[in-house]
Image (cartoon, grey):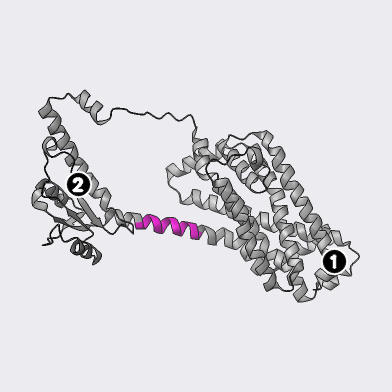
Amino acid sequence: MWLVFKKEVIELLRDRKTLFFMIALPLLFFPIIFGGVFYFSGKAIQEAQEKTLKFAVVGGEFAPILTKQLSARDDLTIVKTSLSSDDEAGIKAFVKTEKVDFVLVVPSTFSNDVLSSGQQTIMLYLNDAGLNMVQRRVNEVVKEIENTNQQSAFISLGVSEAIQEGLLNPIVIEKVSIADKREDLGEKIGGFIPYLVFILCLQGAMLPATDIGAGEKERGTLETLLITPIPRQDLVMGKFFTIAFAGVTSAMVTIGSMFVWGVLLAQGMAIKLITEFMGAISPIDFVLMFLMLVPVVAIFASLLLSLSIYARSFKEAQGYMTPLVFLTIIPIIIALLPGIELKGVYAWIPLTNVALAMKELIKGTMDYMALIPIFVSTSVIAGLLIAFCVYWFKREKVLFR
């Protein structure tokens, strides 16, 4: 078995394409992708924040203070228009042609005297399909005018500041979270760690699995291997461990690479946060996460090897393996749903239970008794799939179909 494992690993190391996908791609390509996404999304947000918006006010004579304060902002430029408040189609067309970013329509009944006019409505026309800061900037100006009008009304009524606060905010809820930083951050990102690890393990194992089974059929080397005195089950286990080794290596290299690049490129505050968060997770929790990954990788490796053995060609094997990605995502998504906890039936559902357990270990709220159904269910399924793989490999009509 170990002789076959050594032989397969040596062949993997000689294959530059496999090495690229297992090591070079995770080390460089994935960090570049994620870094590029964060960079360009941050740049887009920054450009939206710094962009000077053009606007028009219909009925601006009824709200001179609002018009003046909007025009006084450096990030807003007023555009004159002859449109009337009744011409809704014209106002929409004016915004759609991108001559302005938004149009405010002030009713003729508008007044800053809250006591006489009551609540009033100003229409804001904009294209809200893309990223923009229109409503935020308008709200900043409107809020300032609102506060001024409220203060004037309270003064005229002779209401003290304490009563004003009570009228504006009759009940204040002060939140006191009992969750520490680790639990809070773990709840936010803990569910995505299994998603990343599972997919990487599966993707990292796909290429060697395809080559080890279907690839050997195409090259004609499978027959030579079968006439050796090595028992069939040892041949299967040697190939199985090679696929599992490739999957784990790919996942660990990718995660390690992303962590290192994140620390190197992050700001000082982010480095401190990462250090505190990672330092709060005990070595035992890391070991448990790795141990839970072992039967998961065994499930992936046995499924991939079975499909590769069944396939007639490399291309056919790839076609069979692609749906496994979607089948893997479904139980992980279940673990991400609100209200799903590592209790009852969910502790027995393969992949879902491991994803939930990893999240709990990251949060520091793990009930270690739940590890029993996790290891039992995943190990039993992995064992059955490995046994099926051995059975599958012993069938001549499967090997030479």
Relative horizontal placement of residue 341, taking residue 87 as reference (left or right): right
Relative horizontal placement of residue 5, taking residue 369 as reference (left or right): right
Q: Amino acid at mark 1?
A: Arg
Q: Which label is found at residue 9?
A: none
Q: Which label is found at residue 121?
A: 2
Going from N to C along the chain, the mark reached first, 1 or 2, is 2
Q: Residue at x 64, y 45 (%)?
A: 354
The answer to whether residue 158 is above or below residue 310 is: above
Quadrant including the N terminus:
bottom right
The answer to whether residue 390 of the structure is visible from this angle is yes
Q: Residue furthest right?
A: 229
Identify the residue under disc 1. Answer: 395
Is label 1 in a helix, a strand or a loop? Answer: loop
The answer to whether residue 90 is above or below residue 184 is: below
Provide residue 71's location: percent of width, then percent of height: 14, 52
Q: Are marks 1 and 2 in contact (CB under 8 Å)?
A: no
Tag 1: Cα neighbours inside 10 Å, few (<14), some, or many (≥20)? Answer: few
Q: Residue at x 13, y 61 (%)?
A: 83
Q: Amino acid at mark 2?
A: Thr
Q: Residue at x 48, y 29 (%)?
A: 178
Q: Residue at x 52, y 43 (%)?
A: 338
Q: Residue furthest front?
A: 86
Q: Main secondary structure of the magenta part?
A: helix
The answer to whether residue 67 is above or below residue 92 is: above
Provide residue 284's location: percent of width, then percent of height: 66, 37
Give the image quarter of residue 29.
bottom right
Relative horizontal placement of residue 218, taking residue 83 as reference (left or right): right
Q: Residue furthest left?
A: 61
| Magenta part of the chain | 32-44
Provide residue 176's location: percent of width, then percent of height: 42, 28
Residue 62 located within the stretch drawn in magenta: no
Is 141 or 220 nearer to us in this picture? 141
